[in-house]
Every structure is written in C-alpha cells, then in structure tokens.
Amino acid sequence: MADDQITLMAHLMRRAGFGATRGELEAYVAQGYEATVEDLLHPGEPVTMPMDILRRMFIQNDESSGGGAVDWTYRMITTRNPLEEKLTLFWHGLFAVGYAKGNQARSQINQIDNFRRYGLGSFRDLLVELSRDPAMIFWLDNNENKKGIVNENFGRELLELFAMGIGSYTEQDVKDCARAFTGWTIANAEYMAVKANKDSFSPYGRIAWHFEYRPDDHDNGQKTFLGETGNFNGEDVIDIIVRQEATAHFIGTRLFQYFVADEVDDNAEKLIAEMMQSYFDSEFEIRSVLRTMFNSEYFRSEDARFARVKNPVELVVGAIRLAGSCQTPSTSDDGRFNSSNFMGQGLLRPPSVEGWHEGTEWLNSGSVVERVNMAARELRDASQPGVTAVIDRLASSNGGTLTPAEAVDGCLDLIGPVPASAETRASLVEHVARRGDVDLGGETKDEDSEKRIGELLSLIASTPEFQFA
C-alpha cells in the first residue's frame, strides 16, 4: 500500500505539472503539501538550457512551428517550474493560435512567453496582452478591423471562446466589442511582411511582428456592451468582461476541467463557486483561483484522482521525465518530442480557434497505439536514470529478490503510484511469473533481471490506468 502522503503529492504533481519521480515526491512531502502548492504558484528561475545552446543541438530548431514545439517540449521536460509550463499549455489550448494566415512561429513563441509572464497574474492583464498579441491579431484578422470596415472575428471569439462562453452576450455585444478593438493592429505590416519572407533565424532570430494602435482606424462612437454604454476602447471592454459572473464561472470551469476532472458534477460546481469567489476577492488573479482549487477538499479527495485523460503532451513529457531519458538535448530528440503531434496534439498547431477537445476524445484507435508505444519505449530501457533509480529501490528490499507479485507492486508504486485494477495487476503478475522471481541482489542476481524490470515498467506504461492523470 502506497503511503497516503506520497499518493496525494503524486496526484498534485500530475495535475500541477507532468508527474514526478519518487525521490522528488519524497522531497515535496518533507516540505509539506500547502508549502509545495505555494512554491508551484511562485515559480523562480526555470534553470533550463539557454536558447542559443539549444539551437546548436536541435537540427530543426529554426523557429519554425516545428522547431518552436521542440524547444518548448524540452523546456517542459527540464524545467524546475512545472506549473508555469502546465498553465502555459492550458492558455495555449484556450487561446489557440496556429501557424497560418500570415502568422510567424516567432510571434507564436513570443505569445507562449507572454503566457508564462502573465498566466498566473490578473486575468484582466492577460486578456489585454492577448488582444495586443500579433499572433492573435493575425489569427483572428483584427489587422483588418477598422472604423467603418469592422471585422468581428476577434470580438466574437473573445466573448465565446476566451472569456465568457455562449449565451452570456448578444449579437449587439459582439458588434460593439469588435468596434472597440478597431485600430488594434500590426505595426508597419507591409515592410515587416517583406522582411519576414527574407530573414534568417541565424544568428539573432527571426523578426517578429509588433503591435500598433492606430487612432485614425479606431471607431470613437458610442457603444453599448453588456449593459454599459460609453465611448469604449478595447481595454474598457476587457474591464467590463472580467467583472462578469459569467467570466468567473467560465474560467473557473475551464481551469477545473484541465486540472481536476474532465466531468463537472454538483460537487465540482461547489468548488467552482469557491474559485469564482477567489477570482473576485483577488481582483481576477489566476494564482488565487488555483490556490483555492489545489488546496480544496475536492481536489485532494480520492474521487479526483485519475479522473482526467492525459493529453498527449502530458503523456510524452511525463514519460520522458519519469524515465530520465533527456539529461541533455540531442539532435535525436526531435522525433520523440514531436510524438504528441501523432497523438493529435501538435504544439503551436491547434486544429482551430477552439483548440483541442480534451477528455476521452484523446483516446481513439489510432492515437492509443502511438500513446502506448511511446510510453513503453521510454520506460523499457534499464540504462536510463529514472529506470535505474526504480531498480535500485527494488534491489534494496528483501535482499534484492522479489516474487512476481512484489516486483509488480513495487513498480506500480514507484512510477505512480499507479492504481492498477485487480485484472491488470493479475495480468502483470502472470507475465512476470513465467520466468520466476526477480533477483536484483548482489552477486547472485540474474544478468537479465534489470532488463525484466524495464520490460515490466514498459508493460505498466501500456496499461489503461497509465493513460489517466
């Protein structure tokens, strides 16, 4: 039976990050649950490798969308700020922007940096920065939104997909919201377009688009928005949006579904109400909302554990972190890091402005094969540091000789704990038992015992239970 504190901490780190090794979990437990939550909510230096060195290691690291995805995956694997990256991934899915429509990967990468910078702070400030973001401006055509020639794309999605949800506004609200953002555009777009087509990523990086407000293109007329009337600009509209109950419920629900459970039941609604109160009490601070969520009785309960399907990036990053198979960057990592793309989640390549549909939609006949193969590959190699650490832990008990049941239970515990069903556990024990006890002790150990543990870990990574967080 796994220690309750370890089990709870493992749950927290799966949700607030990408999982953790047993050694990391023990350090967190020694620190305490609420203190660990505070550390996660106040990230320090990520201590990841500088970008100029990464460019020498990754062949495709040319700030194209593929190269940017590889960089970001490496950062998620190696960062000391797991919640910062997990929340950045959340914002990328909510405020989905792709590499198309004249956009640039450099602008997308800058947007991801902004999610790190503003993601834990005021939702109001985050929405303002999003509205000024060149990647978003291109993606939703706000560069074509001018006085007298209003483009409603951004105004509509700001209300429907980014902040409030369908049913919380009228068509007239959409129109006047769009009018408020007229003149929010790209600086020197024609010149920059020529430069962007001819530039090179070496040695200084690609040229990025910049925001510009053009007062001559702004509609200064009176607008009525969500029941308020005035000569509103974009920031005024955002000030009104963040004060709405619908906004607090929308962002609370989306955070709940991403960090707690795929399904929202009556008890979940009670927690979301508490998160909404924290949202208003803190003047719209996301950090406060997350603190309420992570420290809640609901989040800590057994019912919340393994109630989410891991999205592909969570699965890939978590498996690599667990195996310890990425200590330094390598040109051979590109394929592994991009494997989430083949599971349906290509970083910087969302399928539409709606982002990715989470939950059980990640699991289909094509993606499951890729998910299982990827995780099993990472954990099979007994020479990887994370796998070696598991072997060393097992070797330190019972003189290093384990029955098939002890080997299975030990591995399930040390890489999770993973709550295998009776059927799954029985299948694993039966497989190990075909070759008898596992001898990891001293001079008598079997030459292939370590390989058997690697094989067992890969089988656990192939189980249905491993697909849930």
Image: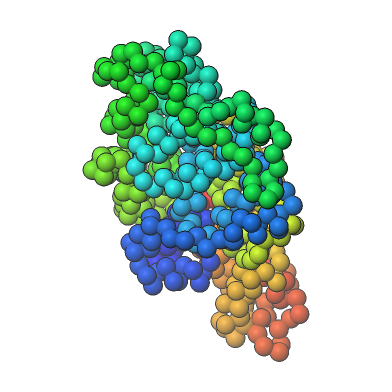
Which residue is rendered at x = 31% and y = 48% of the image?
288
Percent across and percent down for residue 58 are 71, 54
Q: Quadrant of residue 390?
A: bottom right
Percent across and percent down for residue 257 are 43, 41
The residue lying toward the viewer, choosing from 143 and 25, is 143
Which residue is rendered at x = 39% and y = 15% of the image?
219
**How many marks can you see?**
0
The residue lying toward the viewer, choosing from 143 and 217, is 217
Left or right for 418, reference 177: right
Q: Is residue 449 visible?
A: yes
The residue furthest top is: 148
Answer above or below: position of 178 versus 63.
above
Percent across and percent down for residue 167 are 37, 21
Left or right for 297, reference 352: left
Which residue is rendered at x = 47% and y = 24% of the image?
154
The residue lying toward the viewer, choosing from 351 and 176, is 176
The residue lying toward the viewer, choosing from 284 and 24, is 284
